[in-house]
Image (tube, rainbow, N blue to C red):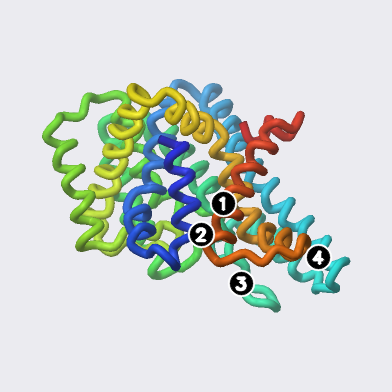
Amino acid sequence: MKGIGILLMMVGHVYYGYIPKLSQLIYTFHMPMFFIVAGYFSKSWTDGKSAKATIRKSFVRLVVPMLVLHGALALWQVLLVFAKGEPWISVLRIFTTALWADVYGPSTLYGPNPLGISWFLMSLFVAKTALLFLSRLRRWALPISLLMAVAAILLHGVFPYSIWCITLGMTAFPFVTLGWWVRQHKVPVWIIVILVLCWPLEYLFVAGPDMYSFLWPCWPVNVLGACGGTYVLYFFSKFLATRTKYVSGLFAYLGMISLAIMCMHGFEIDAHLGSHLCALFGLDLSVWAMYVWRYLLTIALAIALVHIPKIKNIFS
């Protein structure tokens, strides 16, 4: 599921201007799906000592790669400063954005610098940490997480910032809690059917949620539709696992390195690496060929990244 989801994420980012209907379909569920899967494998509260160890592990797993990504982008900007004489403020913007960890970034002399794709990592860390403590309430965890998400969306209308992605993490909180809840309870078939039916309704009549921008056209339908789309992907993944050994194995491998793919995707987008390499080698690609090239380049770099000693421990 994560392997298919990470490919859909890249399609949504790269091809959204050329296949808007496909991007609209992807955005109905793809980011909530990642939060739901993460919640499924999240731990419940046991004691204070275990909670500290769990939070530390989540920090190393999620926040450290985010900081490495922004450090690599800053280094790239340093190289451009020396090569093209660009202003040093571009380097400072990347550092301050990572430390500020706001999806809209701090205001600078050159305007705001968005956090970019790494918002997911910080938001997931916030949501998983919140779930760890709220899981002590057991049956009340899910409704409380929904109320906290609604409160975060309303707060964003008054205070349009998400410092360290706290309010953004709260909007992801219900999906993480849902994943955790599903692992402990058997979901009735009739509920699954309703959720699956809500997914095409969301696609046809309600735009998918833009979690990055706190845009929820219809909160109940968006949540139900996202859960339905996640179930459809789950059933499709099970079908592949039983019918296609090599294809399912490929998706499973991409799922295992999905963190590296996400970070390299963010680096490629912000650094325009694919375009720079084409210019370096004098390649004149069509629009579609350029996007396919950037797509394959990102995956190749991610695969290389998880095979570099020491560095691979950050992304695996």
The amino acid sitting under disc 2 is: Val
Q: Is residue 268 left or right of residue 145?
A: right
Q: Nearer the viewer, mark 1 or mark 4?
A: 1
| 4 and 2 marks in contact (CB < 8 Å) | no
Q: Which residue is mark 1?
A: 295
Return the residue nearer the eye: 216 or 85: 85
Q: Can the viewer see residue 187?
A: yes
Quick one: label 3, few (<14), some, or many (20+) residues within 10 Å? some
Residue that mark 3 sits on: 112
In depth, the one of 66 and 165 nearer the eye is: 66
- Image depth: mark 3 or mark 4 in front: 4
| Residue 80, numbered label | 4
Whole-angstrom CA distance, mark 3 to mark 1, is 27 Å
Residue underneath mark 2: 14
Q: Residue furthest left?
A: 190
Check contact, mark 1 vs mark 2: CB within 8 A. Answer: yes
Q: Amino acid at mark 4?
A: Leu
Q: Amino acid at mark 3?
A: Pro
In terms of sequence position, does the residue under pointer 4 or pointer 2 come before the other? 2
Question: Does residue 233 appear to the left or right of 65 in the view shown?
Answer: left
State the CA–CA distance, disc 1 to disc 4: 23 Å
Say which quadrant the C terminus sits in. Answer: top right
